[in-house]
Amino acid sequence: MKKYDVIIAGAGPAGLTVADITAGQGLRVLLVDLKKDIGRVFRSCCCNLIIEPGTHAETVRYADGAMHFEGNDFSVPYAGSVIPLTNSFKIAPGGTTLHIRGKSAEGSVAVSYEKEAMIQGLLARARQHRTLDIMEGVQALGVENTSSGVRVHLRSTDRTFTASGRIAVAADGVNSKLVESLGLNQTRRKFFARFKVASYHMANVNWPFGSAWVTLVGKGHALGGRGQFYMCPKPHNGQTDPPIYELTIGMPFIGKVPVITPIEELDNLTKKSRFAGWFDKMEIVDIRAATLNFYTPLINPVEGNVVAVGDSASFIETYVQGGIMYGFQAGRAIVKQLETGRGLEDYAASWGASFEYNNPEEIKKATSGFGLHVLKDEDLDYLFGLTKDDTIFGYVNEFSDPDTVRNALYGHIDQVEAERPELAVLLRKMREVSVHDALQVTKK
Amino acid sequence: MQIDTEKCAGCGGCVNLCPQAAIYFMDNKAVIDQLACTECRTCVFVCGMAAPAVSCRFPQFIVFTERASSGSPGRRGA
């Protein structure tokens, strides 16, 4: 097999972006992916563009058939549709609701978009480069640093083989084999739970919220007493009509303890819950799934001649747009590295500088809402009820959203103090919880 | 273990998490190599679609037959 300049494992948003940048500079690039159809998406994943300016030190805007990354000054062709989400509703088990409005210029909290269209746009552009070889149906099992570069161990259903190159890119996602094979997961803190996730795309939903992002908060929504439920309208095959809604169900589980499955939760939510009326005539048009291992982000995403991008280096914190943005920076760093012998440290530095989870202030913001799940359902109902006449602005963004919620609830601290003093103590404590406390709870 | 491909969404989670690397991807569905599988059940615990299930590995090798001497059903390996 010929020797490549760059071998990329994983053709998701991050891997495709690296392939596009590096092959676009004439480097010999091999891109492998487990799937037979790179342009298809079978995994549950973030379905929103996080539009809060400055997320990952980047601002993303959709306009004129492309996604524009303004901070890094590049664009990705996008032929799908988008739905700007103008409101975010958090619903407590008793039905009270915390309403967050969009404060962006467009009045949106986020933008719902189609990941397949993004992937296909990236793939089409990358395929134009003659020096790019793509192997579909090939899994990367591991990678080794050698004196002259890297060796990547690959397999398809009928053979096992090795590819040699100068630089390898681990873009193989949240359960990355390459990061694991380098032993880098030993350097990360693992959260004690894993998540089983399923997403259902539904037609004919009696959806009362218009273009909104809806989160069900609290224990009482889930049959098994814990879990996460998100729902929003979603463009489908470039269309927004008829409306399709995506319901994502995430069930945490610890070790090998059997849990209630997302399938059972779906049945409960759509047939027996207070929301059953939404789903009277509901028809499921697409199903996606995922398994998530929770690791804290890699502090350094470069190990020898191996560069980690996207979820392989940072779980879901990068989102799709972050995967693309870091893929862009990694691609440019690799080109520079192969030309001049230095460059990968640029990528590591940009990661460290822009990545929220490496910034103590950002962690503090994100973890300040930590503790919402320790509130009893009746407390959540009571607290959300207090906010019904409030006008709260914010974004769907895991970094700033907890802060928004915390501040909204804390705005009523005097009333809570008078009516439910013990809850006021909890609310104050929630506000003071440190990053250290938060991480202690997630210790393995 | 075997995977019910009707239930499998094709997310690839078990493929990457199988400690024996016994799970392959064929036609965008997970398929378990029956000789490499050690029945550790990792795939069962990680799958959100409840697609993997414990099932007899070599059902075709197990044959029920009538024993002439006792008349009770017996089992014979092929």
Image: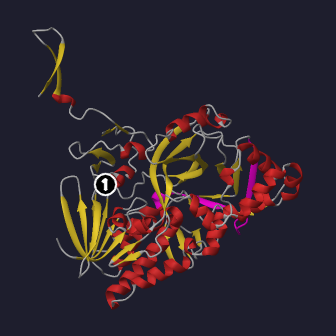
Chain to which mark 1 belongs: A
Please provide percent x and percent y for residue A283. Answer: 54, 37
Quadrant containing the N terminus of chain A is: bottom left
- Relative to the observer, which residue lies in front, B16 or B40? B40
- Relative to the observer, which residue lies in front, A63 or A196? A196
**Membership of A115 in magenta stretch:** yes
At 29% from the left and 45% from the top, the residue drawn is B31
Please provide percent x and percent y for residue A73. Answer: 53, 80
Taking the image as drawn, is residue A73 in sight? no
Q: How is the image coloured?
A: secondary structure
Residue, disc 1: A36
Image height check: is A239 above or below A200? below
At 74% from the left and 48% from the top, the residue drawn is A380
Image height check: is B33 above or below A307? above
At 42% from the left and 84% from the top, the residue drawn is A345
Mark 1 residue element: loop
Q: Residues within 10 Å of mark 1 (few under 14, many from 20)?
A: some
The residue stretch that appears in magenta: A95-117
Viewed as shown, does residue A263 lie left or right of A127? right
Query: Which of the 4 image quadrants contains residue A153?
Result: bottom left
Please provide percent x and percent y for residue A41. Answer: 42, 54
